[in-house]
Structures are given as C-alpha cells and as structure tokens.
C-alpha cells in the first residue's frame, strides 16, 4: 500500500516538538499561577470523584482497562465541573483546549496517585518494585503457617483430587466471565472425579515445561529463592483453594514473602497488563495465602531447530543480542515425561557434566530429545491485593459452590454442553436444475420461442415489464449496495412525483 502522507522534514519535526514543549511550559506556568486554595479544591474534587467511582464500580476492578476507565471518567467530570462552576469557568476560559488538557492532566494525575496510595491499590503497576522493607518476623510466621498446612504436591493424583473438591484460583475467573463459562465450571465440578493422564500438550504443556526456567530466571535476576507450594485451602472458605507458582522465601531479600505468578504465552503478545482471568487468579492466591504482593512474570521462550542453530547464535549462554539461552533434557520414564534443566549461565563444559549425570540417572535409552531454547522477551509487574474486590467476589464464588454441591446430588445434565449438529446442505441439486430451467424460460427465452408461447405463459404487461427490467437486474448484481440503494430511492421519488 502506498504511503500518501508526506513525511515530516527534520525542521518540521523540531518545530512541532518546540510547539509541544511550549504548550506544556505554558500550561505548567499557568498551573503555578492558580492560587493554592483553588488547586486544593480541584484536587479534592478529583480525589472524591475517584473514590465515588471506585465504590460504584468495585466489580469492574478485574477488567483490563479499569485504570484507564477511572482516569477517563474522572477527567470528564473535572472538565464539566470546571466549565460550569464558578470561579473555575472564568479562570480557565482564556485557555486553549490543548492547554486545558494539560492542566487537567496535572490535576487528575496527582489526585490519582494520592487515591491509589492512600485508599486502594492500582489494578496493576507497570513494573515490579520494592514498596518497603518487609517485616521479617511477620512474613516468616505466614510462610511457616502455609508450610504446615496439608497441601498435595502439584500435579500428583492427590493434588488433582483436592482441586476437584474446591474452586481453585486458576478457575475462579470463569465465574466472572460469560454465562457459558460459568456453566462450564459448574458442569466440570459436578462430573464424577476420575484420574486421567494429565500430561498436556499445547499452551498448558508449554507453560508447564518452561515454568521452572522462569523461576530460575526470576531467582537469578532478583537474587532470591522461590519455594514451590502445593494446593492450599483457604482458612475460612474450604471451597476456595490455590496452588501458587511460588513464594519468595529468602529472608535477606526485600521481596521476602512476595508471591510469584508465571505465564509462558506461545503466541499471545506480552503487554504488561494482566488479563482478567490472571488478575483474578492472583487475587485469589493472595487471599488464600494471606499475602499482599504478587509479581506477575511473563516469559516468552522460543526453541532452536537443532544444536547447530543454537551454537551459531552468540555464546553458549546468551544470543548475539544478549538474550538468555539454555538447554532442557527430556526423558520418558514409565510413560511419564520428565524434564531436567541445565542451570542458567552454565558453560559448555558444565553442560557436558550435567548431561552425563542425567544419562546415568535416567538411562541413555530413555532420553527423548535435547531442547535448545532462548528467552525472547519478558515482563515483570507488581499486583497488590485488592481486599475490596475480594469482599465483593467471595459471596458470588460461594453461591456457585453451593450450586455445585446441590447439583452433584440433584443432577447436572442440563448443564452439559449442547452438541453441535452437523449442518446438512439444504439445497436439492435436482430442484436447482429444475428451477434454473424455469428461470431460463422466464427471463432468457430461446430465440426460437415465439411471442405467442411466451404470452401463453404470462400476461402481456408482465412480459414487457420483465424484458424492460433485465438490464437493471444485471446492474443490481454488479453495483455496490450503496449505489443500488441510491438509484432505488431516486426511482421511488420520481414515481411519487409522477403520481401527484
């Protein structure tokens, strides 16, 4: 496609940037000129609007665009307030719309920061950071308590069975999605529990395979130790459980006690903004474990085709672009897949030692393949516990669980997904051929067909009308709908005028 927009010259770009900087400078200077009392009044107005809107839309906190939704609506309310209420309307009347936008942005941004600092946390932050030094003793007590709770090891038979008898953090999001999603979670929980081969392919299998690599990366990057936990049950609500990807257990780390949630997308773009399902999952995990912070780590891996491609890209542990590289050994033991992970940043010599040890441990005959990977992209952001949303959500989760308990006894067949009937062709070819013959006789009579024969078939005025309209019919099939509609409307108007 041709680019019809003429690119800006360097001089034009410099001029545009100067104008933007000038506008921002003028707005900043104007903002400084507003008396302190008026500034405070505007800040307080926005702060109150943030609070009121938040209280009215607690249920929307899980939505991906919630933070933008809050800012957009508060800005609109501030604009209306300043345009209609004295003395703001007079004070701002001499400003251009561009300058007003910048002034409003100052006010809303400051109010937003104060609101999310003192009232409720943001849905998520654009990065991970340390809020304050953790209370070592308090966090230690929490971790020891979690360790003491019964918790089947992840992806064991006992783990799958325990998850069947509760609604887990990873599936809670379905309750707040569509009716179809809600129906599916009730149906799945009502079906009798059976142990099946849980080895998964696709996105789930990919995530399971690379989760340990993500943990190693997090531990290396943030210099901490992450401990894995099984399926943990909520202290108060036995129907609610969570299996966190990990909790930082290093007492010397400022992340001590912080939870970790990992996602390894295959094709989905990493945006740094948790999907609704993931945000709800993290909230439930923090609620079950009584923790207040969770790092949301997304890591996107890709695999080399072979060892040659791996060796030709940079060094043994990093690509030519400085990305992390690594190796996984895949074995099959008793029909189960086992992965062994080379420690990050290992040398080639260390890899040879590692591989020999694994071959001795599992047997050379059981190795399936060697996986060569690289870390293409990652994002790590902080999500804080939102107790207001939790208070809204738990009654709804409990209601769904009560429905599951009831329908396990009374019956749940009505929730079974309806089978899609295979659509059959509704067109009878024989009828089509017969119809085509009739149409041909009606509108495209053979040159040898006499007018008398045609007259016998249809009245004279109908024949004349059909012949006259043949050209128009062809146009209708080739013109756009808009063109046809215009012509039809014109024809109708002309007909109406002719009848006056």
Image: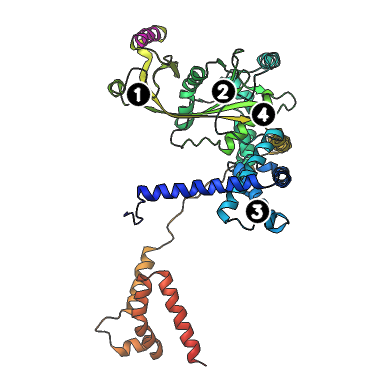
Pointer 3 with pointer 2, Cβ within 8 A? no
Q: Is residue 405 visible?
A: no
Earlier-in-chain disc, 3 versus 2:
3
Q: Tell me which residue sits at (38%, 14%) in the image.
A: 366
Q: Residues within 10 Å of mark 2 (few under 14, many from 20)?
A: many
Earlier-in-chain disc, 3 versus 1:
3
Q: What segment is highlighted magenta in the picture?
A: 349-359
Q: Nearer the viewer, residue 94 or 183?
A: 94
Give how far apart the Cα atoms at labels 4 and 3 are.
48 Å
Q: Pointer 1: what residue?
A: 319
Q: Pointer 2: what residue?
A: 245
**Viewer-nearest of discs 4 and 3:** 3
**Viewer-nearest of discs 1 and 4:** 1
Q: Is residue 368 above or below residue 407?
A: above
Earlier-in-chain disc, 4 versus 3:
3
Q: Nearer the viewer, residue 247 or 159?
A: 247
């Amino acid at each position: 496609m041709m680019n019809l927009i003429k690119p800006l010259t360097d001089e034009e770009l410099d001029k545009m940037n100067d104008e933007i900087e000038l506008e921002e400078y003028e707005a900043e200077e104007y903002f400084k000129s507003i008396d302190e009392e008026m500034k405070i009044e505007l800040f307080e107005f926005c702060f109150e609007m943030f609070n009121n809107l938040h209280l009215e839309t607690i249920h929307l906190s899980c939505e991906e665009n919630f933070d933008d939704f809050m800012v957009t609506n508060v800005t609109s309310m501030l604009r209306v307030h300043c345009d209609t209420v004295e003395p703001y309307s007079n004070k701002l009347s001499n400003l251009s719309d561009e300058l007003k936008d910048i002034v409003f942005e100052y006010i809303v941004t400051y109010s937003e920061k104060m609101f999310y600092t003192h009232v409720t946390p943001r849905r998520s932050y654009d990065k991970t950071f340390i809020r304050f030094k953790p209370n070592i003793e308090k966090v230690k007590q929490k971790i020891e308590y979690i360790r003491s709770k019964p918790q089947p090891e992840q992806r064991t038979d006992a783990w799958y069975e325990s998850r069947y008898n509760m609604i887990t953090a990873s599936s809670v999001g379905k309750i707040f999605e569509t009716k179809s999603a809600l129906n599916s979670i009730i149906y799945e929980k009502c079906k009798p529990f059976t142990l099946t081969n849980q080895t998964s392919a696709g996105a789930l299998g990919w995530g399971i395979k690379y989760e340990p690599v993500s943990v190693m990366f997090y531990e290396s990057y943030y210099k901490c130790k992450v401990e894995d936990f099984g399926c943990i049950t909520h202290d108060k609500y036995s129907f609610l459980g969570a299996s966190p990807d990990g909790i930082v257990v290093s007492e010397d780390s400022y992340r001590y006690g912080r939870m970790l949630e990992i996602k390894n997308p295959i094709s989905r773009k990493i945006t740094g903004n948790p999907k609704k399902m993931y945000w709800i999952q993290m909230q439930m995990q923090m609620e079950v474990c009584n923790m207040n912070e969770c790092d949301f780590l997304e890591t996107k891996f890709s695999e080399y085709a072979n060892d040659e491609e791996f060796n030709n890209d940079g060094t043994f542990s990093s690509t030519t672009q400085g990305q992390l590289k690594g190796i996984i050994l895949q074995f099959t033991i008793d029909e189960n897949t086992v992965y062994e992970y080379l420690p990050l940043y290992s040398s080639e010599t260390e890899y040879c030692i590692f591989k020999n040890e694994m071959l001795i441990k599992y047997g050379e005959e059981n190795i399936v393949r060697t996986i060569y990977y690289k870390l293409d992209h990652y994002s790590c952001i902080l999500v804080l516990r939102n107790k207001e949303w939790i208070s809204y959500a738990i009654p709804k989760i409990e209601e769904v669980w009560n429905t599951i308990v009831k329908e396990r006894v009374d019956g749940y067949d009505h929730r079974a997904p309806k089978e899609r009937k295979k659509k059959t062709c509704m067109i009878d070819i024989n009828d089509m051929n017969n119809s085509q013959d009739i149409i041909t006789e009606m509108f495209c009579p053979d040159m040898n067909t006499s007018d008398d024969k045609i007259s016998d078939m249809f009245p004279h005025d109908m024949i004349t009308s059909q012949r006259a309209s043949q050209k128009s019919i062809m146009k209708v099939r080739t013109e756009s709908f808009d063109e046809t509609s215009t012509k039809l409307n014109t024809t109708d108007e002309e007909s109406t005028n002719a009848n006056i």
